Each structure stands twice: as structure tokens, then as C-alpha cells.
Image (cartoon, helix red, strand yellow):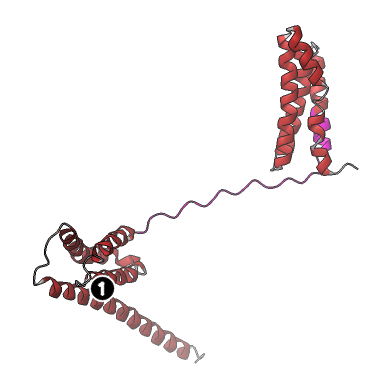
Amino acid sequence: MISAFWRRWLLPFSALPLLPATLFNLFAGREVALLGCLLGIFLPLLATWLMRRGRKGDAARAAVAMGAAAAIVAALGAGAGPIAAVLLGLGAWGGTSLLYAEIREAPAPAEPPPPPGPRPLDDARARLARIGDVAVDFPRLRLLPVAAAIAAVLDEFERRPERLAEAKRFLAVNLDGLERIAARLSAGAEPPPGLPALLAEMEDAATSLRTRLREEESAALAVQVKVLGDRLRGEGFG
């Protein structure tokens, strides 16, 4: 029995007899017959490519290509009548289908998953990154600790998407203010005397908010533990 590997290479060899016929029709100026020969060479090569790809349905497509090649060569290249061309095409299609019926086809590749969309606070993180670039030029000012404290608060809010409205209010005051300060400093403004105290206050506010958010989660967990413990004891499992 011919292996599946060699059966894939039988298709292009079926077009070899058309090479001298193509040259003859070319020099003889028989354009219709030349077109039939060219299509008779191209379609088996297409069928070979389909079989080498090996996806689901490619064997059926290759059989159709071989049937079309036989019908076109018979009708255009050999000048056969339509009935003879159709019969030869059906024979080539059926023979190719039987030849490759046992070859296993690979399933079609799965569609790649869509890329994840932007998170609600990605814009705020990008703004913090730009503030960090400015803060490098002002090491004496506590811009970086404030930005880090705000970033920590963003981490807490991302774990609680139901509180994004509160996050937006926090950012409208703290991040917007810090961004304006960084923009003025990068434009050449001299830090006023009260700026260090303001930055320390902003850092403390962000740290306090993060602490409060964690304490609320801890309190909620403690309540859940107590309720679950009471239920277990009430059901006789404790």
C-alpha cells in the first residue's frame, strides 16, 4: 500500500505529461489549448499544496481541484466534448477522493483569543509613570513616595471593581494634583516652601486610604468567619 507521504506527491506528477503539450501549444499559437494546459498544471499543484497543509476539508478540496483539472484539460486542451470532459472530471474527482480517504486531516486552527481590553485604571497608572519620570529630576522632593502610595491605592481599588467610583474621586484630587505639580516643576517652576508638607500630606492620605480599605476587607472576612462558624455549630458540624 502506498504511504500517505507518497500519495501526497502523486498529484504533481499527474501534470508532467502536460509540459510538452504546453510547449507545443505555445509555439503553435493555440491559445485555448495553452490555457487548458496551464490550468491543468496549476490545479494539481494547488491540490498538492492543500494536501500538504492537511487541514480539515483539504482532501475534498484537492479532489475538486483534480476533477476540475481533468475536465478543463479535456475540454480546452484536447477539444473533447462537454460530456466527455465532465465524465473525465468526475473520474478524477472520484479517484482522488478514494486515494486520500484514509489520510487523517488536522483540525482547523482555533481562533486566537481576543486581546484583553484596557483595565479601568490603566490610564491612571500611565500618568503615574510619567510623574515618576519627572520625579527623578527632583530627588529632594517626595514625589516618588507619593506616586508609590497612590499606586498602592490603585492596586486595592483594582481588587474591588465595585468601588471604582470612589477610586475616581480619589484620583480627581490626589493624582490630578500631583500631576499638575510635576508639570509645573518640569516646566522650570521653583518648589514653594509649602510643597514638601503638601506632598507629605498627600502621601499620608493615600496610605491611610489603603489601610482603611484593607481594614474593611479584614472586618468583612472576620464577619464571614463568625457567621460560618455559627452556622457549622448550629448544623451540628462544629
- Residues 106 and 130: in front is 130
Which residue is found at the position 21% from the left and 67% from the top?
138
Q: Nearer the viewer, residue 74 or 184?
A: 184
Q: Which residues are magenta?
A: 93-119
Whether 58 is among the magenta residues is no
Across and down, in percent, residue 66 comes to 76, 28
x and y, in percent, of residue 32 in the image: 72, 11
| Residue 104 magenta-highlighted | yes
Q: Residue at x 40, y 85 (%)?
A: 227
The one of 115 and 9 positioned closer to us in this rendering: 9
Q: Please, what is the dominant secondary structure of the magenta stretch?
A: loop
119 on left or right of 66:
left
Q: Which residue is mark 1?
A: 145
Please give the name of the residue rendered at 72% of the width and 27% of the height, measured from the top-left corner. 43
Name the secondary structure under disc 1.
Answer: helix
> Looking at this rendering, what residue extends furthest in the right direction?
1
| Left or right: 176 in relation to 4 | left
Query: What amino acid does circle 1 point to?
Result: Pro
